[in-house]
Image: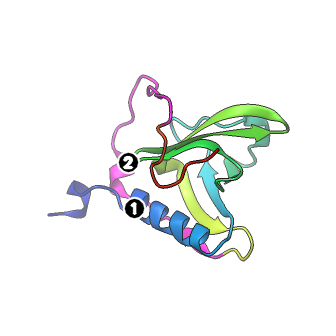
Amino acid sequence: MELEQMTPRRPYLFRAFYDWILDNELTPYIVVNTSKYGVIVPQEFIQNNQIVLNIAPHSVGQYCATNEQVEFNARFSGVPQHIVVPMAAIEAIYARENGIGMGFEDEPQYHQDQCETPPQHPKPKTNPFRVVK
């Protein structure tokens, strides 16, 4: 089977690094390319088409990571926001405290034609392994 026919690696590597960072009691941050289709983040915090987000369980609510996207609720300058980040938009995940993590390479599956209509974003599901209260 050719690489283009396989599912993208990014969601699997993302979840592995997320768990590894948390298991080491560090803070996971992601670098998001805000020019990608489907990204929903506060516009005022974007710099050079990027935003860095803290996705630690104590910083976000209703966290849900699927093969398609990461979705959660967070506060920015005290204002609650619903955040949606498609996997194609995640450029890196790293630990805030030491910068160790992983940058993601381009994958052919993320270059397929984009939808012409905005994606529907259902309410985030509760992650059975980490419940954020």
In the rendered image, residue 17, in percent from the top left (x then y), is placed at 51, 68
Q: CA distance from mark 2 to mark 1?
A: 18 Å
In the rendered image, residue 49, in percent from the top left (x then y), is placed at 67, 46
**Is residue 78 depicted above or below 70 in this figure?**
above
Q: Residue at x 28, y 55 (%)?
A: 7
Q: Residue at x 56, y 58 (%)?
A: 91
Q: Quadrant of residue 113?
A: top left
In the rendered image, residue 102, in percent from the top left (x then y), is placed at 55, 71
| Residue 105 in view, yes or no | no
- The residue that mark 2 highlights is 111
What secondary structure do most residues of the magenta stretch adopt? loop
**Is residue 45 depicted above or below 1 in this figure?**
above
In the rendered image, the quadrant that contains the N terminus is bottom left
Between 23 and 91, the one lying in front of the other is 23
In the rendered image, residue 120, in percent from the top left (x then y), is placed at 44, 25
Q: Which residues are magenta?
A: 100-124
- The residue that mark 1 highlights is 12
- Density class for disc 1 (Cα within 10 Å; few <14, some 14-19, many ≥20) is few
- Farthest residue toward the top? 117
Question: Which amino acid, mark 1?
Answer: Tyr
Between 110 and 68, the one lying in front of the other is 68
